[in-house]
Amino acid sequence: MGKAGKSVKIALVKAPAAKPTAKPAALKPIPLKAAADDAPIIALNLPMAKLSPAMAAYFKKCQEKLGFIPNVLVAYAFDMTKLETFVAMYNDLMLGDSGVSKLEREMIAVAVSSQNRCYYCLTAHGAAVRQYARYPLLGEQMVMNYRAARLNKRQRAMLDFAVKLTAQPGNVEEADRERLRRAGFSDRDIWDISAVTGFFNMSNRVASATDMRPNTVYHGQAR
Amino acid sequence: MGKAGKSVKIALVKAPAAKPTAKPAALKPIPLKAAADDAPIIALNLPMAKLSPAMAAYFKKCQEKLGFIPNVLVAYAFDMTKLETFVAMYNDLMLGDSGVSKLEREMIAVAVSSQNRCYYCLTAHGAAVRQYARYPLLGEQMVMNYRAARLNKRQRAMLDFAVKLTAQPGNVEEADRERLRRAGFSDRDIWDISAVTGFFNMSNRVASATDMRPNTVYHGQAR
Amino acid sequence: MGKAGKSVKIALVKAPAAKPTAKPAALKPIPLKAAADDAPIIALNLPMAKLSPAMAAYFKKCQEKLGFIPNVLVAYAFDMTKLETFVAMYNDLMLGDSGVSKLEREMIAVAVSSQNRCYYCLTAHGAAVRQYARYPLLGEQMVMNYRAARLNKRQRAMLDFAVKLTAQPGNVEEADRERLRRAGFSDRDIWDISAVTGFFNMSNRVASATDMRPNTVYHGQAR
Amino acid sequence: MGKAGKSVKIALVKAPAAKPTAKPAALKPIPLKAAADDAPIIALNLPMAKLSPAMAAYFKKCQEKLGFIPNVLVAYAFDMTKLETFVAMYNDLMLGDSGVSKLEREMIAVAVSSQNRCYYCLTAHGAAVRQYARYPLLGEQMVMNYRAARLNKRQRAMLDFAVKLTAQPGNVEEADRERLRRAGFSDRDIWDISAVTGFFNMSNRVASATDMRPNTVYHGQAR
Amino acid sequence: MGKAGKSVKIALVKAPAAKPTAKPAALKPIPLKAAADDAPIIALNLPMAKLSPAMAAYFKKCQEKLGFIPNVLVAYAFDMTKLETFVAMYNDLMLGDSGVSKLEREMIAVAVSSQNRCYYCLTAHGAAVRQYARYPLLGEQMVMNYRAARLNKRQRAMLDFAVKLTAQPGNVEEADRERLRRAGFSDRDIWDISAVTGFFNMSNRVASATDMRPNTVYHGQAR
Amino acid sequence: MGKAGKSVKIALVKAPAAKPTAKPAALKPIPLKAAADDAPIIALNLPMAKLSPAMAAYFKKCQEKLGFIPNVLVAYAFDMTKLETFVAMYNDLMLGDSGVSKLEREMIAVAVSSQNRCYYCLTAHGAAVRQYARYPLLGEQMVMNYRAARLNKRQRAMLDFAVKLTAQPGNVEEADRERLRRAGFSDRDIWDISAVTGFFNMSNRVASATDMRPNTVYHGQAR
């Protein structure tokens, strides 16, 4: 989603005590950009449901901090349980504590999405890499071919693992984990790299299956 | 996980009012089967954390209804947020309301896992298909080659979509969605098929990346 | 075919002195199982011919020792020359003397058939591995992903060779043979591994091309 | 092997009443060409055994009719059972009665071997196509890319089936068989096409696994 | 190279009557950007030769019209014959007369380069698509997945052909050409589409083989 | 094109001072072989244009030295700029000075064309390898599977690089270049290997896209 640099973390459990009366109307001012390319947001006819208090608060926070609601959230908003579980998992994986930095997690997101050729995730997370890295070219390289980036050994090993896990999941073995350990990753880090890789293999498919369109605003960010 | 036929649904939010004092010790009697093949459960050294009350209650329910705790839950239990978000998403996707039946969702799980050659998911969800279908061969066919099963047009279209989305996600287009609609699926069904396909593309990779071992009990179920 | 543990070896040349008068009628009591999944046995209309004396004797032996006639034999029985040459080659390769054990040959059969996604051979030879190994899980692992099995170096090298020879035959070179030699295989063993791999690359294709259905009895064997 | 145009058919069963005393010495005059490229014949150290009477007679016939012993026969001659079963199956499939002509069977052999990049079979059977077709270019086209040949619909359908069965055996289904039927093939023909395709998927792998070298004489035949 | 919108066409033959005395020194003021990412320009040690008069004039024109010398030209400049033949072919194909518009030719360039994951060409020609199209998103979509772009039938047919020709050149047949004709392309257009596709399959490989780095200026163009 | 052994080099720049009056009629006696397989030369209707003086002279030279005009030249002759740039690049790459011998460049041409299954280039350049090598089998081996050839380390490394660059261009990295350097190639040689590989990845696609037919005379050359 590319909330890069602005840590819009919201734990599902600790969701702000949004009162049941918090009207989704509060979201009205949000201009769900109906620009050429991202309308409709997905190719399925699934009207947005009434936001739960927690999700209304979350959308409000997105609007304040990012200036827009990432389309993936609007897409999931036809069903509050699906939206909440997606947000909870996403926020934990991409913004939670980890020995793998937020930038590195976004690099994985983009390298995986490049393998799967996912337009939505390449756009949204490409922007996130550009922002986090403060080096716009890195975002482009993750989109185009991560092997073209001049990475240190740690990050190269991390992406080699993520891409192999994406392309040939059944071939990953102890030797692959060992390569990560030799590059300095702990067992917990290996879990996180695997979980982020897995998450984007999920998201890429939901986005491709529904023709999900990224907010056009991403394209111009952090160039 | 294959809790087939026993609907151990537990909504994370509505989690049983487990008192904070519910001791994980309550789980002691659970024999985390240390049999040959599923010990250790994963190849990473990530010791189980203290279960949150919700998760302690959930594990207890699993033990009562299934007779064991699926290893995937034990694997995620090193971190309560990760365990809870995984359980919440899994339960919504596989046990929640949908126009796609629970058996059909398990068929997708296995056909996708066959494509990705995931030992854990093929074992656990192969057992689930055998149980739900009351026709053990169907489970075998999903594992080996879904094209060998004698499916009706609806289920064949569903699996063709799921497998294409798994193998070539970037090539899925409107024509593929149209094929599902012609086979009788609604737009909401298409979302569910895509979300289940996505979920197992995630789980397959977490399982393969960590060498997750299925509980040996699955192998003998519903033969 | 999975005549595991029962060594129904019959050399074509030394075929029992079955008299020309041995009536195929003797086979009448054989209930060619017309169960749901394996009828018809193949998708081609090729009626069974009159069994030659040697083949009538062989079918009788199968019936006595296995309790059924493997469907692949019934499929080939439209033509005695084809049936006899198939049986002769099969029996020599899978039951003849070799430095590669019968279990190992069956492991190759299943790992190759998994690569080719052959429903017939995975079912019949998966059962054979379960029987020979006296460890049912090994059969499942060969079907699902041989890399998930905890193999010794010898057997791992053997299956790596068989799977590479199956997936990329034109890339096999001296270095691959050397790897087998270092794992303890003789040149004669390498021939046998190659011949068994080749044989199942043939059988998988004949079975897939004709939609050959395995006897349903295999599914429940040696679980 | 490419005994094209010279029908060296020899039924294993009706093997000439070669006396046990038929000395392999009788084969001495056969110059097993030790030219640059086909010596040694395979990369495994498997010395030729004493030929059985049937095989001695068969080798003699080859020598007389072809002017040489195809190297594949010499390769298998370390073991008489293996040699005899290979010869029996080969002769039945490639020279026996069938609605698929001998030329067409050789075309399948080469198109399959091209897919698998098998040097031995492309050389030997490429020569056979050149001979049978009396149109040398057809052999080249089968080796290089069968789609470049100007084939009639029947032969194109036949090769499309053989190549799909080679490259993606698990994807072959009723629709593929129907395509052959519409092109005029009977169910028996479909078996034969499948069996020849299967046979070369076996032979290609035995040849590649052992680095089998074709007799150099093939290269110049029927240009 | 992405000289989009500025038609720096220069015919090799009609090369401006650059006097032999035109010193390459004239190029001195050109700041061959030694920024982080594009220095060195290639991973091979091939020092720039003295520019021929025609090439000196061409470089001067590039500098004037683009503001920089595309790195690919500097890379080829170690040998004047190679530089001149590359420039002549490039200018004819990408800037010469054709029924396929310059934008469409650039779209082919990027869709092909995405298939081959060529960092140099995706960067330089992605910028060209953004410029020609006056719709920056189109450039991103060509880079990420041309199927995500909302194309008319003509352009979709064109890119489907170019990508098939890139990924499976040996499978292109009359039916593919017919599809282009039905989409309104003439035989001459088909040649041009094929030639541009071929050219970038060449350039992608030269760039990848040498780790050619695009001028960093491209990244920010026409966003 | 396979002008092997006859170095028909013609530099576009130093093109013989063919007078503008040199009538293409001079080419009349050239029997553009209308034999079964190479007529029409391509599947597009693109009539030959009036040859430019330089190209008329070049065709005449081809006719004198080769005895025929390679069909690829006739195919490009619908447009003089396209023909001239193709000829200039071809002659520089395949006949110009290089540390990579002419035979080696032809070996690359054929190994690349085998990967891409290009009938035209395999035929024309297969003949060239046979001629240059004075060892006809080498041409066959390049066509069928270069790994079957008994190459020295230098040539094997060269072809491994060319084939990887053809099949997975985006995966080529410094380690691949280092392997070439260790095999004795200079940086300039690496450029030449890459450029020839690139060139045939272009030509293969132009030939496949247009169903270009090789002159039948190639098939019989240098057997």
Image (spheres, coloured by chain):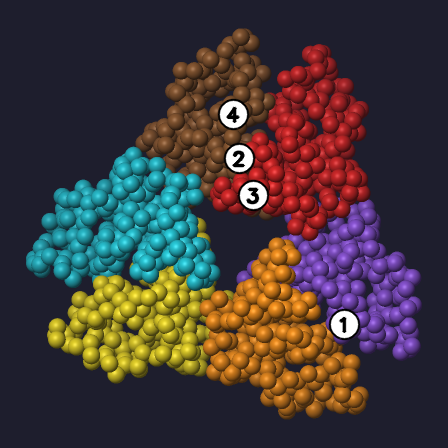
Chain colours: A purple, B orange, C yellow, D cyan, E red, F brown
* Residue identifier under label 1: A79
In this picture, residue E51 sits left or right of residue E169: right
The front one of E116 and E73 is: E116
The CA distance from mark 3 to mark 4 is 22 Å
Which comes sooner in the sequence, label 4 or label 2? 4
* Residue identifier under label 3: E179
The CA distance from mark 1 to mark 3 is 42 Å
Which residue occupies 56% across, 66% down? B157
Q: Quadrant of the N terminus of chain B?
A: bottom right
Mark 2 residue element: helix
* Residue identifier under label 2: F206
Give how far across and how far down residue D111 sits, in percent.
38, 48
Question: As shown in the figure, which amino acid type bears the numbered disc 2?
Answer: Val
The CA distance from mark 4 to mark 2 is 17 Å
Question: As shown in the figure, which amino acid type bears the numbered disc 4?
Answer: Pro
Q: Are marks 3 and 2 in contact (CB under 8 Å)?
A: no
The CA distance from mark 3 to mark 2 is 17 Å
Give how far across and how far down residue C205 sits, in percent.
39, 61
Q: Do tags 4 and 2 sit on the same chain? A: yes
**Residue D29 figure quarter:** top left
Give how far across and how far down residue A36 sits, in percent.
79, 50
The front one of E127 and D58 is: E127
Chain of residue at mark 1 = A
Mark 1 residue element: loop
In this picture, residue A79 sits left or right of residue E172: right
Mark 2 packing: few (<14 Cα in 10 Å), some, or many (20+)?
many
Q: Are marks 2 and 1 in contact (CB under 8 Å)?
A: no
